[in-house]
Image: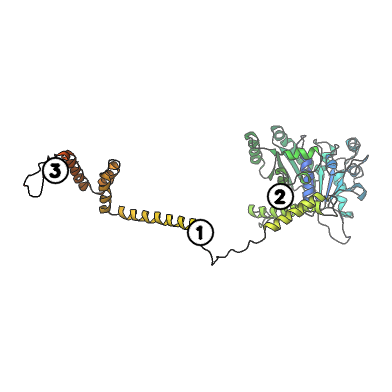
Amino acid sequence: MTQAPPDQLLPSTEIIAAVSVQEGAGTTTAVVNLALALAAAGRSVLLIDLDPKGRSSQMLGCESTARGGAERILLEASLDRDMVVETRIRELCLATAGTGLSRVESELAMMGDSQTRLYQALTKLSESVLHFEHVLLDCPASLDLLTRNALIAAHRVMVPLPCDTKALNGLPGLLTTINRLRAGLSHPLYGIHLLISGHDTEPASQVLVDRVRQDYGRMTLLSEIPADDAVHEATRQSRPLLIHAPRSEAGQALLSMASEWLTLGEPGNQPDGTWLFDARQARMEQHRERMLKGLSRWPIDRSSPLYDTDDVMRQQDAMALEALYQTAAPVRRIRLDWRPKRKTLQRGGLIAGIAIIILVILGWLSEADHRIDIAAGLVGSDHYWKAGSVLLSRADAVAYRELLFAVRLVEENREQLILCNDNTNPTSGLACMIHVPMASPRP
């Protein structure tokens, strides 16, 4: 909360109502963490807890009093300094839900302007010394007078929508009520925005998500809050998820939602004020980085109520490790006195020898004569007969047939040739008779 100089023209305050007609839709989780994310981005934020159960007040560590600030704002139709309290976050203030908030509806019903009391109070904010850039309204899960006051006062309405058929079937009735309440009012309503929450990887959940985006495409935020055990753990401990587990999957999704929300109120990069997709994503990333810096700064800032010595030590360790690993490695230079080891020489020689053999074989196989020579040597051995025959037949069919004929000639006359060799001498005129096999016909 900040005080504005009297002579300074104040920017308009964005009023956001978080509404759902179903219990367990995650309305309080969404609105409290949105308030924290906006505060982390450096925005001044006021959260008004209109839920008689006081869940927002509990999450932010503020106990309910007999008459809370939210009750006084409605009954008095004004917003004064003593109606809000500071939270542990410097940029975030809270109007708590008192124990009498559940009974305030009966008192409002007796007033002729029962549905516009909150609107009257917030319109006077520009005349006050208090200045907030965002006012968030956490509403009960019903369309009672408390919720109707919020819907009439809001510039934008956020509707957390769980992935179940009951919530989807009740959505048209809620939208009809909002349109009926706002009909004829000069107070602008810039948009109703659906926030898909609690979805998982089940096919049924995805079918519902696709149905919402098909039926309410422009109203549906790009960001989706997944089902995450960290959300239930933070709720059990009455802590905001962005404080309890900001790095969780749901925590990161909530940051994306808050970043997207800020772009809703900013002029786009198109002439008509809309955004191109890539430009909007880049802008969202800028907001997200700023929020992350703010969230990481709170636990290590000595002036912050969230200062935590353990977080400070972890942060210092992380910075030391990052500096250690980012240290430049020394440049490796070639040593002039380097001598190869024996194993290195052996491996190098082996590789070089294999390479030479492969090159020689490839050279031989590239010419028909070399292939014939190799095949002829292989054919003579029974072990390599098949390989040699195939190689030779592919190289030269005529030479292959001649070689086969010579082999058959030797095999059929082996004994006669041995006998002739034993009985023949250079001076004798004996002839050696052999049997010549019939040549096989050509294929």
Q: Kindly identify the amino acid type of the residue bearing the numbered disc 2.
A: Glu
Mark 3 falls on what kind of element? helix
Farthest residue toward the left? 429
**What x and y, as percent, mark residue 209?**
65, 38
Q: Secondary structure at mark 2?
A: helix
Numbered tag placed on residue 422 in the rendering: 3
| Pointer 3 with pointer 2, Cβ within 8 A | no
Q: Which mark is residue 341?
A: 1
x%, y% of residue 152?
81, 43
In the image, 140: left or right of 324?
right
Q: CA distance from mark 2 to mark 1?
A: 63 Å
Which residue is at the front of the view, 404 or 291? 404
Relative to 357, does residue 114 appear above or below in the rendering?
Answer: above
Picture quadrant of residue 390: top left
Query: Which quarter of the figure is the C terminus placed in?
Result: top left
Taking the image as shown, residue 440 lies to the left or right of residue 30, namely left
For the residues carrying marks 1 and 3, which lies nearer the camera in this image? 3
Q: Disc 1 vs disc 3: Cβ atoms closer than 8 Å? A: no
Q: CA separation, marks 3 and 2?
A: 107 Å
Measured Cα–Cα span from mark 1 to mark 3: 61 Å
Q: Residue at x 70, y 58 (%)?
A: 323
- Find residue 8 and report its horizontal and vertical position in percent: 85, 61
Is tag 2's residue or tag 1's residue first in the polypeptide sequence? 2
Q: Nearer the viewer, mark 3 or mark 2?
A: 3
Which element type, helix, strand or loop, lies under badge 1?
loop
For marks 2 and 1, give the one nearer the viewer.
Answer: 1
Residue extending furthest bottom?
A: 336
Residue tagged 2:
260
Quadrant in the picture for residue 268: bottom right
